[in-house]
Structure formats: structure tokens, C-alpha cells
């Protein structure tokens, strides 16, 4: 099957657009990586609890729970705000986020907050992800376990 001139031109435009995006984004992404702290911008629940909750420093930060509102309404950390992660980059939600405070993100198990952290840091916010989140899978009766928990094979050096 041969491509039409229109398909070839469309593919060429798509490739040019991808190259342009890379050229625009790469400096920002490299800068992001270079500014990543030694702790990878994470804090454990234990450290967060002891450094912020027990010392009353919770008022000095912005705690953001990025789970669905229905899940947030079931339980959340005292003082946490809620914006669902898929709505985070909407203009009116970005306006709610402080530029003068550290934002701590929490979600189910930490994966989503890690992704949201990256987006917000690229926008200039100071963000830390609470590693492992609430430790509760959003999928009903799905345990939180990794490769090693299942005793899957690894290569030992």
C-alpha cells in the first residue's frame, strides 16, 4: 500500500511537531532533573507525621490530597485540601495553590502524587510527594505489593 502525498505530508508535520516539542521541553526537563533533591522530593509518611503533624508545622505547608472527592470524603488527613489529580492543571485549581509554601501531595499509594509532583515542579511550585501515600490501593481488594513480595525471580549479584 503506497502512501498518498497528503499522508506523507501529515507524517512529516507530526514528526516536526514532535521535534519542536522536544526542543522546547528538553531544557526544562534537564533543569528539573538537576534540581531534584537527594531524597527525590519524597518524604515518608513517618517523617511527614513526625516533622509536620506532631510539631504543628502543618500550618506552614499546603497539604493536597489528589484522590477523587468521594474517596477524600471517606477519610483524609486533617488540614488537607482536595483537588482530583486529573483536574489539577485546570486554571482555577492552579490558582488555589500557593507559590510561597511547600505543597505536599498524597494519594492512594504514591504513584499518582509522584506524577503530579513532576508537573507542578515544572510549573515552578515547591512540591514534595508523600511516599507510599495512604498505602491503600484504589482497586478493591488489590493488595499493595511489589515484585519481591510475589517472590518473582531476580538476578542476585
Image (cartoon, rainbow, N blue to C red):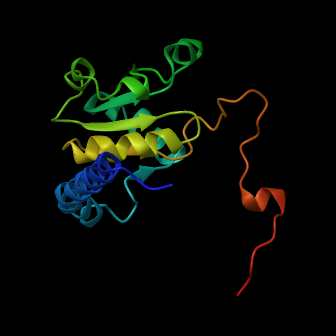
In the image, 7 versus 106, the foreground residue is: 7
Q: Is residue 153 above or below residue 27?
A: below
Residue 59 horizontal/vertical position (percent): 29, 27
- The answer to whether residue 6 is left or right of residue 142 is left
Q: Quadrant of residue 70?
A: top right
Residue 110 horizontal/vertical position (percent): 53, 42
User: What residue do we see at 29% from left, 29% from top?
Assistant: 89
Q: Quadrant of residue 23?
A: bottom left
Residue 73 horizontal/vertical position (percent): 53, 12
Residue at the right extreme, as displayed: 151
- The answer to whether residue 67 is left or right of residue 25 is right
Q: Is residue 84 above or below residue 130?
A: above
Q: Is residue 51 visible?
A: no
User: What residue do we see at 54% from left, 39% from top?
Assistant: 133
Q: Is residue 64 above or below residue 104?
A: above
Q: Is residue 1 visible?
A: yes
User: What residue do we see at 73% from left, 59% from top?
Assistant: 147
Residue 67 horizontal/vertical position (percent): 50, 25
User: What residue do we see at 15% from left, 35% from top?
Assistant: 100
Q: Quadrant of residue 149?
A: bottom right
Q: Is residue 92 above or below residue 5?
A: above
In the image, 77 versus 91, the foreground residue is: 91
Amino acid at each position: 500500500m503506497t502512501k498518498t502525498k497528503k499522508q506523507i505530508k501529515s507524517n512529516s508535520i507530526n514528526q516536526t511537531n514532535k521535534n519542536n516539542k522536544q526542543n522546547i521541553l528538553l531544557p526544562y526537563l534537564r533543569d528539573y532533573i538537576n534540581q531534584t533533591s537527594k531524597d527525590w522530593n519524597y518524604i515518608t509518611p513517618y517523617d511527614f507525621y513526625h516533622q509536620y503533624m506532631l510539631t504543628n508545622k502543618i500550618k506552614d505547608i499546603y497539604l493536597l490530597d489528589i484522590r477523587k472527592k468521594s474517596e477524600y470524603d471517606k477519610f483524609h488527613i486533617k488540614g488537607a485540601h482536595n483537588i482530583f489529580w486529573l483536574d489539577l492543571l485546570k486554571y482555577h485549581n492552579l490558582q488555589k495553590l500557593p507559590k510561597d509554601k511547600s505543597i505536599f501531595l498524597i494519594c492512594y499509594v504514591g504513584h499518582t502524587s509522584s506524577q503530579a509532583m513532576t508537573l507542578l515542579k515544572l510549573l515552578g511550585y515547591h512540591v514534595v510527594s508523600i511516599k507510599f501515600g495512604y498505602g491503600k490501593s484504589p482497586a478493591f481488594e488489590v493488595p499493595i505489593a511489589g515484585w519481591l513480595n510475589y517472590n518473582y525471580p531476580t538476578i542476585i549479584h
